[in-house]
Image (cartoon, rainbow, N blue to C red):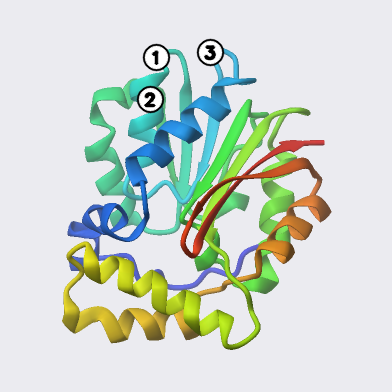
Amino acid sequence: MNEKVETPFKGKVVSSYNEGPPRQVPGYSDLHRMISLLLAEVTPQDGRVLVLGAGGGQEIKALADAHAGWSFDGVDPSADMLDLARTVTSAHDNRVRLFEGYISDAPLAPYDAATAILTFHFIAEQQRLETLVQIRKRLKTGAPFIAVHLSLPQSEPERSKWIARHVAYGLANGTDPAKVESARQAIGTRLSILSPEDDVTMMQEAGFSNVSLFYAGLSIKGWVAYAA
């Protein structure tokens, strides 16, 4: 389903990866708490959670800390990022399984919930709908799915303005100024970013209903939806 491509998340990039989201994502720790609360509304105490883009381990750790009965299957294409996730989630290693690969490499389960946090903007646009379909395929009917990623208007000058705001927020929070222009170029040319309207439409096309925006931190949006 997903074409296997070389991931940029390896080596030195991995060692400092978990320093980035708190600087670049407004309210990062609060975002994890919001995700925890939304999932818990319908996820049973012994729920199984699928985590797409599990490298780094931060969301698994946050959810495992908050819900002692949940178990987690995480998938990520980067072996180095999964090694980092194993370290970060080591206190919960009896409840966490990690798989190297893409959504097609994840178990079919079915799962009680799923997340994709800061992941979809790394998935090529032509692969995003099928990725969502494969997530839906692995969920029980009515199970929640939470997606958080870059999503901004695609017409100019709004697109460039929102990219600049995202970069400026990271700079104000300690991002190395020498990396600012490369970050702007990466967001503008190498990441796969849709408009919020297209993101919602694609989730609906993949079989999710009641898609609701619960988080907006400058250029990063978060939705909760349910497997129809």
Callout count:
3
Label 2 or label 3, whichever comes before in sequence order? 3
Q: Can you tell which quarter of the image residue 25 is in?
A: bottom left
Q: What x and y, as percent, mark residue 179?
A: 23, 80
In the image, what residue type sits under mark 1? Ala
- The numbered mark at residue 68 is 1
Q: What x and y, as percent, mark residue 88?
A: 24, 38
- The numbered mark at residue 25 is none
* Residue at x 40% of width, y 73% of height: 165
In contact (CB < 8 Å): disc 1 and disc 2: yes
Q: Which residue is mark 3?
A: 46
* Residue at x 38% of width, y 38% of height: 30
* Quarter of the image with the N terminus in it: bottom right
SS type, badge 2? helix
Label 1 or label 3, whichever comes before in sequence order? 3
- The numbered mark at residue 64 is 2
